[in-house]
């Protein structure tokens, strides 16, 4: 397993991390929870959003709308 960061602004998520084992920062977890509650992430710091996308916890559709993936919902349930 590699410990190389997926995103330079997010050393918490490593390329060897699976979503279930990802370690999110407080800001990333807050953004993921907000997105799961239906709150738009369009005004969030894109470094946070990109880290969630890279970890497979969220996805961005053609219109640029970010939504939580099934893995992201499992991650949130495992942390509650």
Image (tube, rainbow, N blue to C red):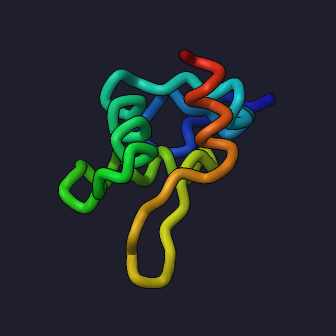
Disc tally is 0
* Residue 67 locus on image (x, y percent): 48, 58
* Quadrant where the C terminus is found in the figure: top right
Residue 10 at x, y percent in the picture: 43, 35
In the image, farthest residue toward the bottom: 62
User: In the figure, is residue 55 to the left or right of 67?
Assistant: right
Q: Nearer the viewer, residue 9 or 49?
A: 49
Residue farthest right in this picture: 1
Looking at the image, which residue is at 40% across and 82% down?
A: 63
Q: Based on the displayed image, in which of its 4 quarters is residue 64 positioned? A: bottom left
Question: 43 or 70: nearer the eye?
Answer: 70
Q: Identify the residue at horizontal 56%, vertical 44% (top origin).
A: 6
- Looking at the picture, does residue 6 appear above or below residue 18? below
Q: Quadrant of residue 19?
A: top right
User: Which one is nearer the viewer's eye here, 56 or 30?
Assistant: 30
The residue furthest left is 43
- Tell me: residue 78, above or below residue 51: above
Q: Where is residue 18 shown, x and y percent of the image?
A: 73, 35
- Figure quadrant of the N terminus: top right
Direction from residue 28 to residue 1 in the image, left or right: right
The residue at 55%/37% (across/down) is 5
Q: Residue 60, percent across and down? A: 49, 68
Residue projecting furthest to the front = 37
Up the image or down, 54 lies above or below 42; here it is above
Q: Is residue 1 above or below residue 73?
A: above
């Amino acid at each position: 397993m590699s410990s190389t960061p997926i995103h330079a602004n997010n050393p918490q998520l490593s390329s060897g991390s699976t979503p279930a084992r990802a370690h999110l920062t407080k800001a990333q977890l807050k953004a993921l929870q907000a997105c799961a509650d239906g709150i738009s992430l369009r005004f969030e710091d894109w470094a946070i959003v990109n880290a969630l996308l890279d970890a497979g916890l969220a996805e961005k559709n053609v219109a640029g709308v970010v939504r939580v993936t099934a893995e992201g919902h499992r991650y949130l349930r495992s942390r509650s």
